[in-house]
């Protein structure tokens, strides 16, 4: 048992060297390459996923921002249009009221003017008629002086002003 | 008693006594390793690797006794 | 009925035990555990000086291990796919164990340069140890028996010599002879103590060689010897009852031996990595 078995040692050397060579060339290299590739691809896909996630986040943020802006703008437009409408309405109303006032005032003026003219004409005709009637009734008996006095009295009794006012109202 | 009997008795004693120390040592070693794994499970891998190295070194002592016993039985006849 | 069945089973087991005890054993044979480790040349070859290249049991086991390694390596090289099947996944797991669990975990530098050796020594020892647990017809009169090439001291010494040589080669090629060997001497120590420590370090380097080889050898021999003793004890006690009990126990021992085979390969490789890594990081 204790005499050195050189032959066995040589055989071990040979077989072990072959095993190292074969494992190195055929197993370790390809497996390491495969594992590296796999790690690389996993890393790549993780990076890509991360990138896509970031991109998506960015886009989402952008969309959110745009949406918020758009909503704000729409609100603004709405507000503006509402104000504009109200303004227009108020303006229109004011104008209409002014016009109607004006028309009313014109009508009033016209009526007053007409009434006044009518009253004046009426007054003239009454005086004429009175004079005529009085002339016919008392042509002989009354002097010229009395005639004039009587006409004035009659005219004083006629309340022409009141007549005009009634017409007015 | 013939000389072979002494050799075989010596072999038995060598193996038996030689197993005492490593046995105690392995018990302490593995116990401590498990203790530290329980305390720090996050470095369990490192502890286990070093535990196996320690087991290898400690167990070698028992195996020297085993080799001496083998020599006594088969070579020193 | 169930209770009756239980009793029936108990009776059958007891009858079997008694029967086993009563059956007389075979012819008395001698217990020859050591014979399992004898190496008789199977194929005589001429010897060159002291080197007798005769093929014996250990050489055949070495060939077998190498053949298994070559077949696995070539199968892997041929059928390597990006999506691994079961076999490839298992091999990749073993590879990762060798690379990350052994080389990376103990070596600070030189993992890429020295991994081919450390990985190969792991797989070589592992395959040799596991083949040792397969019954093969290389026993006396070609009966099935257990043997492992690593249960031979000269095989393990050769493997340990590889590690020994590579350790110092790594250190010397990195630092040069003067600096590497000088690194064994602590520069801070007083003169006489320094030389003393140097001698101790040199002796410990030699004992690493011894312990590395003897550990693997003795583990394999002890495992196989225990299995052989368990099988042979049936012959000693001349009783089928005891033989049956020992067979049951030997299954447990066998399972433990599978564990030991893997652990010893792991320890051999990891200590090689520790030594080589230590030599690479020694000259600070």
Image (cartoon, coloured by chain):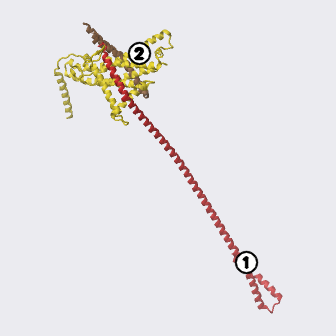
Chain colours: A red, B brown, C yellow
Distance Cα–Cα, label 1 vs label 2: 146 Å
Classed neighbour count for the residue bearing mark 2: other residues with Cα under 10 Å, few (<14), some (14–19), many (≥20) = some
Position in image of residue A123 (x %, y %): 75, 82
User: Left of C251 or right of it: where is B58?
Assistant: right
Q: Nearer the viewer, residue C79 or B76?
A: C79
Q: Quadrant of residue C216?
A: top left
Position in image of residue C170 (x %, y %): 43, 20
User: Left of B68 or right of it: where is A98?
Assistant: right
Q: Residue shown at 79%/86% (left/top)? A: A150
Q: In which chain is the residue bearing label 2?
A: C
Q: Nearer the viewer, mark 1 or mark 2?
A: 2
- Give the residue at mark 1: A116
Is C107 placed above or below C49 here?
below
Number of marks in the rendered image: 2
Position in image of residue C68 (x %, y %): 31, 27
Quadrant, the C terminus of chain B: top left
Is B77 placed above or below A155 here?
above
Helix, strand or loop status at disc 1: helix
Q: Quadrant of residue A168?
A: bottom right
Q: Residue furthest bottom?
A: A140
Q: Nearer the viewer, residue A90 or C72?
A: C72
The numbered disc on residue C15 is none
- Give the residue at mark 2: C205
Helix, strand or loop status at disc 2: helix
Quadrant, the N terminus of chain B: top left
Classed neighbour count for the residue bearing mark 1: other residues with Cα under 10 Å, few (<14), some (14–19), many (≥20) = some
């Amino acid at each position: 048992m204790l005499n050195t078995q050189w032959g066995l040692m040589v055989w071990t050397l040979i077989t072990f060297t072959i095993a190292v060579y074969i494992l190195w060339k055929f197993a370790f290299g390809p497996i390491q390459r495969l594992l590296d590739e796999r790690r690389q691809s996993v890393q790549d896909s993780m990076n890509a996923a991360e990138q896509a996630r970031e991109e998506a986040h960015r886009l989402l943020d952008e969309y959110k921002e745009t949406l918020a802006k758009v909503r704000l703008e729409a609100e603004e437009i709405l507000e503006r249009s509402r104000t504009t409408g109200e303004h227009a309405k108020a303006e229109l109303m004011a104008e209409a009221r002014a016009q109607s006032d004006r028309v009313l005032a014109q009508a009033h003026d016209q009526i007053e003017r007409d009434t006044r003219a009518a009253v004046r004409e009426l007054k003239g005709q009454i005086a004429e008629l009175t004079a005529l009637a009085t002339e016919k009734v008392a042509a002989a008996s009354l002097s010229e002086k009395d005639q004039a006095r009587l006409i004035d009295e009659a005219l004083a009794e006629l309340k022409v002003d009141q007549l005009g006012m009634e017409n007015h109202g | 008693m013939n000389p072979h009997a002494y050799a075989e008795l010596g072999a038995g004693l060598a193996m038996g006594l030689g197993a005492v120390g490593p046995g105690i040592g392995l018990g302490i070693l593995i116990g401590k390793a498990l203790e530290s794994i329980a305390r720090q499970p996050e470095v369990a891998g490192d502890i286990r690797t070093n535990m196996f190295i320690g087991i290898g070194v400690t167990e070698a002592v028992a195996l020297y006794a085993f080799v001496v016993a083998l020599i006594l039985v088969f070579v020193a006849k | 009925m169930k209770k009756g069945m239980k009793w029936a089973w108990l009776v059958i087991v007891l009858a079997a035990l008694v029967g086993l005890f009563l059956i007389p054993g075979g012819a008395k044979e001698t217990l020859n555990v050591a014979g399992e480790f004898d190496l008789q040349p199977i194929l005589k070859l001429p010897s060159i000086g002291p080197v007798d290249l005769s093929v014996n049991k250990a050489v055949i086991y070495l060939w077998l291990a190498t053949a298994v390694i070559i077949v696995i390596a070539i199968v892997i090289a041929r059928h390597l796919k990006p999506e691994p099947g079961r076999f490839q996944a298992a091999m990749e797991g073993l590879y990762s164990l060798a690379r990350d669990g052994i080389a990376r975990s103990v070596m600070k530098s030189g993992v890429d340069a020295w991994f081919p050796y450390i990985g190969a020594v792991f797989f070589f020892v592992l395959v040799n140890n596991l083949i040792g647990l397969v019954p093969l017809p290389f026993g006396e009169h070609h009966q099935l028996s257990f043997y492992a090439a690593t249960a031979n001291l000269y095989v393990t010494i050769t493997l340990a010599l590889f590690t020994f040589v590579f350790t110092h080669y790594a250190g010397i090629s990195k630092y040069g002879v003067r600096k590497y060997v000088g690194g064994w001497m602590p520069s801070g120590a007083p003169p006489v103590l320094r030389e003393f420590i140097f001698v101790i370090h040199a002796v410990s380097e030699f004992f690493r060689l011894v312990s590395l080889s003897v550990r693997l050898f003795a583990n394999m021999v002890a495992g196989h010897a225990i299995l052989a003793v368990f099988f042979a004890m049936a012959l000693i006690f001349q009783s089928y009852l005891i033989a049956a009990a020992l067979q049951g126990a030997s299954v447990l021992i066998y399972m433990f031996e599978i564990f030991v085979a893997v652990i010893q390969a792991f320890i051999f490789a990891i200590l090689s990595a520790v030594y080589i890594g230590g030599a690479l990081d020694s000259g600070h």
